[in-house]
Structure formats: C-alpha cells, structure tokens
Image (cartoon, helix red, strand yellow):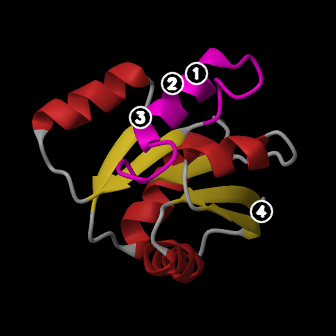
Amino acid sequence: MAYNIMIVDDSLTARTFIARTLEISGVELQQVFQARNGQEALDLLQREWVDIVFVDINMPVMNGVELVRRMRASEVLKSVPVIVISTDRSAQRMNELKAAGVQAYLTKPITPEELKSIVERYLTPAA
C-alpha cells in the first residue's frame, strides 16, 4: 500500500533529507507533501489527506507543538499519526509532546530503518 506522507520543517534541507530517507527506506510512497511551518501544514491538511505526519518542533509562524494540539482538537485530523523529528533530546520535551498526542519522537540524525519501522508500526493494519 502506498502512503501519503507530510513532512513539516522550516528547513528545506531537512525536508529534502527526510523525503529522500523515506524513499531509501523502501516505504511505498504515493505522495510526499511538504510544509514550512504548522500553519502551512494545517492549510494543506484541509485540502489533502495524509496517512502520517513527520514534524519538527521549532518553526516560525506555528511550531510543532501547536500543530499537534490543533490536529488533536480536530475531529478529522485527530487520528492521523504524528511523529516528531528533532535535535532536542530532552526528556521534558519528549514527555510534553507525547502528552500532546505525538505517537513517537525521533532524534536527528535519522536512518531509513527508523523511518520504515515507524511507518510500519503506525500504518500497517493489524492482521
């Protein structure tokens, strides 16, 4: 099954790296959407369905924490898995985001194996 995936990060380099890492991982991709901040992501999510969102924390306009909170408050978006990819390794930050509704927290740098494992964990239907 091919997936629609969204990558939200204010860095074009980071978005490109994550997209390429997903391709290398062997995950079947239908479409990869990209947004520079949480507000762009929400706008895009009003028009396009995605199966999973990979999001950075620190971004201008709307950060990743606020994006997660707004997604969890939306009847349409609350079930979409959100995975944080960040350089922030603090336990406090990880706990805050998990409490806000993030499914998983990956620290940069990431590997194709990590991304594939996450996609499989949250998107593969139970047998």
Residue at left offset 40%, top offset 22%: 100
Choose between 26 and 92: the one closer to the eye.
Answer: 92
* Residue for point 27% across, 65% down: 108
Counting residues from the start of the chain, the first of labels 3 and 4 encountered is: 4
Amino acid residing under circle 3 = Val
Q: Which residue does the numbered mark 2 point to in the structure image?
A: 69
Which residue is rendered at x = 71% and y = 63% of the image?
Answer: 33
Q: CA distance from mark 2 to mark 3?
A: 6 Å
Amino acid type at image mark 1: Arg
Residue with the mark numbered 3? 65
Alpha carbon of mark 2 to alpha carbon of mark 1: how far?
5 Å
How far is mark 3 from mark 4, CA to CA?
A: 27 Å
Q: Position of residue 106 (x, y in %)?
A: 31, 53
Residue 119 image point, x, y percent: 54, 53
Residue holding disc 1: 72
Tell me which segment is drawn in magenta. Answer: 56-80
From the image, give the main secondary structure of the stretch colored magenta: loop
Q: Is residue 124 visible?
A: no
Q: Do labels 3 and 4 touch, CB within 8 Å? A: no
> What separation in Å lies between label 4 and label 2 (alpha carbons)?
27 Å
Q: Earlier in the sequence, mark 4 or mark 2?
A: 4
- Marked residue nearer the N-terminal end (1 or 4): 4
Q: Find numbered disc 3 in the image and state the secondary structure of the residue it sits on.
A: helix
Q: Quadrant of residue 20?
A: bottom right
Disc 2, SS: helix
Q: Secondary structure at mark 4?
A: loop
Which is more N-terminal, label 3 or label 1? 3
Q: Secondary structure at mark 1?
A: helix
Which residue matches tag 4? 2
Quadrant that contains the N terminus: bottom right
Residue contact at pointers 2 and 1, CB within 8 angstroms: yes
- 38 vs 93, left or right, is right
